[in-house]
Image: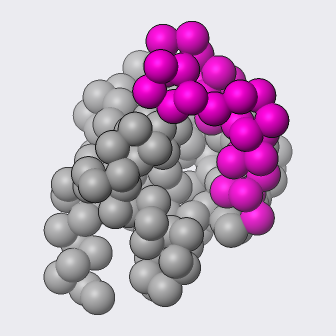
Amino acid sequence: MFRVVLDANIVISALIRPDSAPGRILRAAVDGAAVRMVTSGPLLDELGGALAYRRLQRHLKMDPQEREAFVVLLEQISDPVRIADYPPPGICRDPKDEPYLQTALAGRADFIVSGDNDLLVLMRIEQIPIVNAAAFEHVLHTKV
């Protein structure tokens, strides 16, 4: 089983396009047989805020209670970690992405899956690869 940190953009893409690579990855995480999500408070907060973006509402059609329930559900099916003991590595072009790295390190993740170029350009943090959804889906199919 792969321990994976999913960027909020992957989760949102999965909700908008369930038949896409992000959608299949999120389904695998919900199923829990091959993928176990690793998350943290800051990542859940970011996802909750992103789900409320006005420009996404025409695609998502989630009211505030549904958005909150979705974030709670993701937390329940994930391994939440505390990142307080893991200082930001300080290597992201966008400092707001540092919690993804901290979460991966704290949760001993196998992968970070993101569509964010500020993370993808790093390629890895320590021994943890940072890949896009298509690359992770390929790994998932070759290892499972």
The x and y percentages for residue 30 are: 55, 69
The x and y percentages for residue 75 are: 74, 57
Name the quadrant containing residue 42. Answer: top right
Q: Residue at x 58, y 16 (%)?
A: 53
The x and y percentages for residue 5 are: 52, 55
Q: Residue at x 67, y 56 (%)?
A: 74
Q: Is residue 76 above or below residue 48?
A: below
50 and 138: which one is in front?
A: 50
Lateral position of residue 123 relative to residue 48, left or right: left
Q: Which residues are magenta?
A: 47-76
112 and 77: which one is in front?
A: 77
Asked if residue 64 is among those painted magenta in the image, a careful observer would answer yes
Q: Residue at x 70, y 36 (%)?
A: 67
Instruction: Work out whether residue 97 can be spotted.
Output: yes
Q: Is residue 136 above or below residue 141?
A: above
- Colouring mode (rainbow / by chain / secondary structure / one colour): one colour
Lateral position of residue 129 relative to residue 33, left or right: left
- Which is the main secondary structure of the residues drawn in magenta? helix
Locate the C terminus by quadrant.
bottom left
